[in-house]
């Protein structure tokens, strides 16, 4: 690169770097501020007299003797039993992702390798169901759940979340399978594999990044859901997101805002860890192209 070209590109590099830094600050600020506030008392973090109290923490020092406190986490996890909601969330998420990926992988492979025209129409029907509001599916399941005395239990939320997530999983995995040449299947079967053995030992290892990417999106759907879990689960079986809202209280019941703030941080932190651990698989899955045979 010549000196003149380098000089011309320098302002662009500075501008791009400044934009990225600004974006990171704006994107990270809500979580950083919430985490900081979770270590204060309510009088400081929600001070109307001076917003600087959220930084200096005079009431936190006066009440606890230290500039930071973990009272919000102790109150949420131990006093209010937030750990039960975390356990319920883990069960719902694990079951939803497992069922969705199992059915989506088998269905997506079958539709991708099918030469019949009905495969296209099945995908179109799935797309219609994916476009429907979630509340429509919830209301459709309410009557049988009440009649069979199933309402309030974790399987009810799992069933509906799988029904909501399955069209997306089917479409996404179907597109990944289309990018894998049929020659791989045929070569494996020529070598003596059955169709299922070729699928299990040859195709799945090739499209593993796609499975991880689809599983992550399924995880986020079930993990962050509010409408389905709030309507179908009883108070003792609630997952994290609807239970955080209950910490805020109502006009009849006084809540504890700092419990909610601590619970928000507790629910958000695992998502950052998950993205950092699987970032390479996510990128490779989203950018997966055709496999050259």
Image (spheres, grey):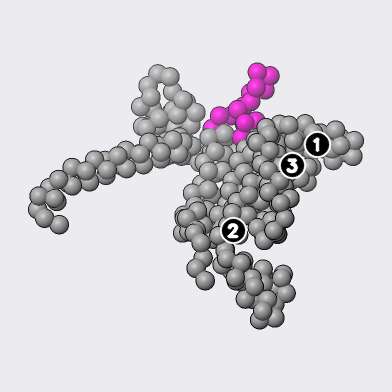
Query: Of marks 3 and 1, which one's residue comes earlier in the chain?
Result: 1
User: Could you tell me which secondary element the residue under label 3 belongs to?
Assistant: helix
* Residue farthest along the right direction in this orientation: 147
Distance of label 3 from label 2 (alpha carbons): 28 Å
Work out which residue is located at the far bottom of the displayed protein and give it.
191
Mark 3 against mark 2, which lies toward the viewer?
2
Q: Is residue 20 left or right of residue 137?
A: left
**Which quadrant: the N terminus?**
bottom left
Does the rendering let one see residue 253? yes
In the image, residue 111 above or below residue 255: below
Residue 110 in which image quadrant: bottom right
Q: Which residue is mark 3?
A: 160
The answer to whether 232 appears left or right of 90 in the picture is: right
Q: Local crowd at mark 3 within 10 Å, few (<14), some, or many (≥20)?
A: many
| Residue depicted at x 50% and y 58% | 288
Q: Earlier in the sequence, mark 3 or mark 2?
A: 3
| Nearest to the observer: residue 25 or residue 194 | 194
Residue 3 in the image: x percent, y percent? 9, 53
Q: Which residues are magenta?
A: 243-258
**Residue receiving disc 1:** 141
Q: Do callouts 3 and 1 mark residues in contact (Cβ within 8 Å)?
A: yes
Which residue has dot 2 on it? 178
- Does residue 170 show up magenta in the picture? no
Q: Earlier in the sequence, mark 1 or mark 2?
A: 1
Magenta-drawn stretch contains 249: yes
Marks counted in the figure total 3
Residue shown at the point (84%, 40%) measured from the top left: 150
The residue sitting at 74% across, 35% down in the picture is 137
**Element on which disc 1 rests:** helix
State which quadrant residue 201 falls in: bottom right
């Amino acid at each position: 690169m010549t000196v003149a070209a380098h000089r011309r590109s320098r302002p662009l590099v500075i501008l791009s770097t400044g934009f990225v830094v600004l974006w990171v600050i704006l994107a990270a600020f809500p979580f950083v501020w919430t985490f900081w506030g979770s270590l204060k008392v309510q009088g400081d973090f929600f001070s109307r007299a001076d917003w600087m109290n959220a930084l200096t923490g005079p009431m936190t020092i006066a009440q606890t003797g230290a500039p930071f406190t973990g009272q919000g986490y102790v109150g949420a996890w131990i006093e209010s039993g937030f750990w039960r909601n975390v356990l319920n969330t883990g069960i719902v998420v694990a079951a939803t992702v497992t069922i969705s990926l199992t059915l989506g992988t088998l269905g997506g492979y079958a539709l991708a390798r099918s030469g019949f025209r009905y495969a296209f129409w099945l995908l179109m029907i799935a797309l219609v169901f994916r476009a429907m509001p979630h509340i429509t599916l919830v209301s459709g399941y309410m009557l049988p759940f009440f009649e069979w005395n199933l309402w309030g239990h974790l399987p009810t939320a799992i069933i509906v979340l799988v029904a909501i997530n399955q069209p997306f999983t089917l479409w996404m995995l179907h597109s990944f399978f289309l990018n894998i040449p049929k020659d791989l299947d045929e070569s494996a079967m020529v070598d003596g594999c059955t169709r299922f053995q070729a699928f299990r030992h040859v195709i799945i290892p090739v499209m593993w990044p796609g499975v991880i990417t689809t599983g992550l999106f399924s995880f986020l759907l079930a993990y962050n859901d509010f409408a389905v879990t709030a309507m179908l689960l009883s108070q003792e079986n609630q997952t994290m997101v609807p239970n955080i809202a209950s910490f805020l209280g109502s006009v009849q019941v006084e809540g504890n805002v700092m419990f909610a703030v601590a619970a928000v941080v507790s629910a958000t932190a695992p998502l950052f860890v998950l993205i950092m651990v699987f970032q390479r698989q996510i990128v490779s899955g989203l950018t997966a192209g055709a496999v050259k045979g």
